[in-house]
Image: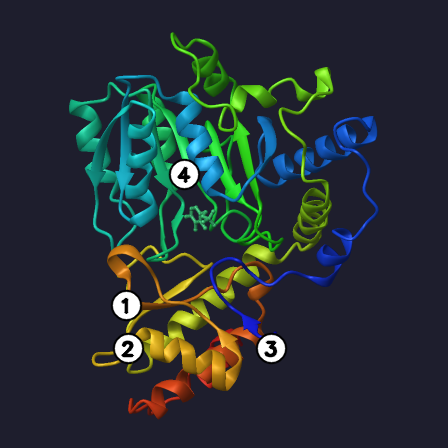
Amino acid sequence: MKEMLIITPGPTAVAENVRLARAKVTTNPDIDLEFYDFYKRTCDKLAQFLKTKNDLRILAGEGILGLEAACASLTESGDRVLVLDNGIFGHGFAEFVELYGGQALLLQSSEKEAFDIEILEKFLEKDHDFKYATIVHCDTPSGVLNDLSKICPLLKKYGILTVVDSVAAMGGEDLQVDNWQIDIALGGSQKVLSAPPGLTIVSISPLAYQAMENRQSPIASFYCNLLTFKDYYEKKWFPYTMPISDIYGLDQAVDNILFDQEILKRHAMIGKATRKAIKNSPLELYLQNGYSNTVSVIKVPNGLNDQELLRKMRQDYQVMITGSFDRLAGKVLRIGHMGENARTSKVAYSLYALQKVLEESGLKFETSLQEDFLQALK
Ligand SMILES: *Cc1c(COP(=O)(O)O)cnc(C)c1O
């Protein structure tokens, strides 16, 4: 395979020390008690990084597993669930809720802005009889960032459990699980954390456990049952064999992030500079506000084909950015400046390549995306 600059919003580039950690000699993780300690230490570090005292678990499956596991473990037949919907992943939670027999009520807010707190406030005044609510931190297809610091405490005021998909934000945007009262927070290995795809990270509050334990009916899944992991350490038993090499890699990736004191600042600077360069060009950002610093989403200029542009970027410049999917397929291009991708040289070269490809396709620029980006970092 040709060497590519991977600058997609997941999977992200993987650091060399993470790749090497995955090559370490392995043991039998079911039997070797030292592995239980290793797993626990990795979880404890992740909890520190999520600013939580809640239990933390690493599950063997990419982010989607966490979304489904949260819904499977909490939902009973007929449960009402509030699904906050201002993006494709936000909307998608309803499917998991319904798959497990729940009644999903979608509350919509503009897809081009952070979720409007007033809409939620007004709605909850009238109707707040929900077991839990779901919200996406950064909804990656559009890049919108929702203000969890306001949304989750508001839901909790009404006794509604909070389930947050922070797969595309965790590590690149502030996430304070305890302060913001998040009952279940979900992350994936392949986004900001910059380990290869394959693992879900989930934090579970005592109230969320209580809701699972007080169910009338059993959880209708084994793989998605979060209770099966609850006492793994005391019992020295995992519900299925842990992918030990993946967890070695994740542990190193977490160390990289914990060591990197400037990580949030760097994401903020790179996000802001990217948006500034785009705004100063003939290109247009998709969002009106609520920009996540982990991904920039740009409208495909009129008359151009996203797949063609992406192909040229790969073929002629060895840069891999991406389009989007579902309702946004064909409409936007996305630069994923998250985790290992959030490096000025990588973003600068991606912007250079993007401009070249657009110019070759007939778009006229009076500015340089790359220079504007670099200038804005100063
Ligand atoms: C990437 C992502 C997921 C997980 O999707 P996978 O297909 O498992 O990678 C979930 N939610 C959001 C917001 C994401 O960006």
Question: Where does the image place residue 288, in percent across and percent down from the top left?
Answer: 26, 61
Residue holding disc 4: 149
Q: CA distance from mark 3 to mark 2?
A: 24 Å
Q: N-terminal of the two: label 4 or label 2?
A: 4
Determine the residue positioned at 45% across, 41% down: 64
Which dot, 1 or 4, sits closer to the camera?
Answer: 1
Determine the residue positioned at 33% across, 37% down: 93
Q: Are marks 1 and 2 in contact (CB under 8 Å)?
A: yes
Q: Is residue 370 visible?
A: no
Element at label 1: loop
Q: Is residue 267 visible?
A: yes
Q: Amino acid at mark 4?
A: Ser
Element at label 4: helix
Q: Are marks 3 and 2 in contact (CB under 8 Å)?
A: no
Query: Which disc, if any, is residue 305?
Result: 2
Around disc 3, counting alpha carbons within 10 Å, would you say few (fewer than 14), some (14 to 19), or many (20 or more)? few
Residue 86 left/right relative to 187: left
Which dot, 3 or 2, sits closer to the camera?
Answer: 3
Which dot, 4 or 3, sits closer to the camera?
Answer: 3
Residue holding disc 3: 2
Q: CA distance from mark 1 to mark 2?
A: 7 Å
Q: CA distance from mark 1 to mark 3?
A: 25 Å
Q: Residue furthest left?
A: 126
Q: Are marks 1 and 3 in contact (CB under 8 Å)?
A: no
Residue holding disc 1: 330
Q: N-terminal of the two: label 1 or label 3?
A: 3
